[in-house]
Every structure is written in structure tokens, then in C-alpha cells.
């Protein structure tokens, strides 16, 4: 029981490590602000001296803990930001903007292709309906296959029902 209690206390103590502030900046009054949320857009880039996942170099940590200005802290941390560890600018990430642009273009092409396919299907349905209406209006005896697979000659009621069905297809697809 005591081992379980000790293990629980150790785990509870380790959970508090995630609660540390990830952002640090100097506000417009010159006060240091530590938060787990990003500063407002009104805070200039030069006043932000710590970001999530960024560790401060030793000189920058000392300057950040002193009551000095934020500019020396930024200058001291600038050499640490090289290559892949470079921080994104405050504006829109260029890679993200490019991916979003490509995704929007791909979606536009896909929707255009779908519209073209639907319009082609409607044109085909319209053509078939016109042919069926011409055949129905020709006066030639027409037959249908019933549920049992036997051929039946269409009477006036069946012709009228088929004419209504063909007309509804033409109304929806022939525009």
C-alpha cells in the first residue's frame, strides 16, 4: 500500500512539469509576462524572448531574469536559432499557406470535375428521354417486361404513365 502511495505521489509530482509557462515576453508597461498562451498580436516580435519548445541560451536566461530590456535577450538567443530550429515569423507560415492554396486548388478541380460529370450525365439522360418520348409519341405498339419476365403490350394507361415519367426526367435534366 505504501509503495502504491509513493508511486502515486511521484507521478503526481511529475505531472506538474507540464504546467510550466511556455511563452515569455515583455508587455507594453515593461513587465515580464510568463504564460502558456501566445501573446496578443499587439506585442512586437522583439519583446518575445521565449516560445514553446525553445530553450534560452545561458546569457539570454540571465538577461531575461534581470530587469533589463527584452532586446538583449533576443540578441543573445538569435545565434541559437539556426537551420531547422528557426522560429516561424509572426505572420502566416509560408509552407502552410502554400499547402492550403494547393488543397484549395485541388478541391476546386475536384468539384469542377464532379460538376462536369453531373452535367454530362444530365445531358445523356435528357437525350435518352427525348428518344423515349419520340418512340412513345410515334404510335408504334410498345411492350414492357412485367415482374414475372413476360412481355406485355402497353395500353393507354401504361403509355400515359410512361409519358409522365419521361416528362419528369426531361423537366429535371433538359434545361
Image (tube, helix red, strand yellow):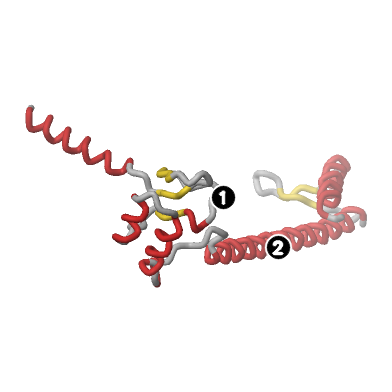
To which residue does mark 1 refer? 41
Q: Is residue 84 left or right of residue 149?
A: left
Q: Earlier in the sequence, mark 2 or mark 1?
A: 1
Question: 10 Å neighbourhood of mark 2: few (<14), some, or many (≥20)?
Answer: few
Q: Is residue 53 left or right of residue 99?
A: left
Q: Is residue 8 left or right of residue 46?
A: left
Question: 10 Å neighbourhood of mark 1: few (<14), some, or many (≥20)?
Answer: few
Q: Which mark is residue 112?
A: 2
- Count of marks, rendered view: 2
Q: Is residue 130 left or right of residue 102?
A: right
State which quadrant residue 98 falls in.
Answer: bottom right
Percent from the top left, x then y, of residue 43?
A: 54, 50
Residue at horizontal 67 percent and vertical 44 percent from the top: 147
* Visible residue check, residue 75: yes
Identify which residue, 87 or 133, lies in the foreground.
Answer: 87
Residue at horizontal 79 percent and vertical 51 percent from the top: 143
Amino acid at each position: 500500500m505504501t509503495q502504491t502511495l509513493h508511486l502515486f505521489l511521484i507521478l503526481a509530482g511529475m505531472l506538474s512539469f507540464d504546467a510550466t509557462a511556455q511563452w515569455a515576453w515583455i508587455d507594453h508597461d515593461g513587465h515580464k509576462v510568463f504564460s502558456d498562451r501566445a501573446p496578443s498580436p499587439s506585442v512586437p516580435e522583439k519583446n518575445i524572448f521565449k516560445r514553446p519548445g525553445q530553450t534560452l541560451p545561458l546569457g539570454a536566461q540571465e538577461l531575461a531574469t534581470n530587469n533589463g530590456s527584452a532586446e538583449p535577450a533576443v540578441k543573445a538567443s538569435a545565434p541559437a536559432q539556426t537551420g531547422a530550429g528557426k522560429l516561424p515569423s509572426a505572420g502566416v507560415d509560408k509552407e502552410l499557406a502554400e499547402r492550403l492554396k494547393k488543397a484549395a486548388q485541388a478541391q476546386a478541380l475536384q468539384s469542377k470535375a464532379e460538376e462536369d460529370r453531373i452535367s454530362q450525365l444530365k445531358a445523356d439522360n435528357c437525350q435518352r428521354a427525348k428518344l423515349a418520348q419520340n418512340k412513345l409519341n410515334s404510335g408504334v405498339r410498345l411492350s414492357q417486361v412485367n415482374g414475372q419476365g413476360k412481355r406485355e403490350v402497353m395500353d393507354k394507361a401504361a403509355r400515359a404513365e410512361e409519358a409522365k415519367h419521361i416528362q419528369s426526367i426531361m423537366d429535371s435534366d433538359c434545361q
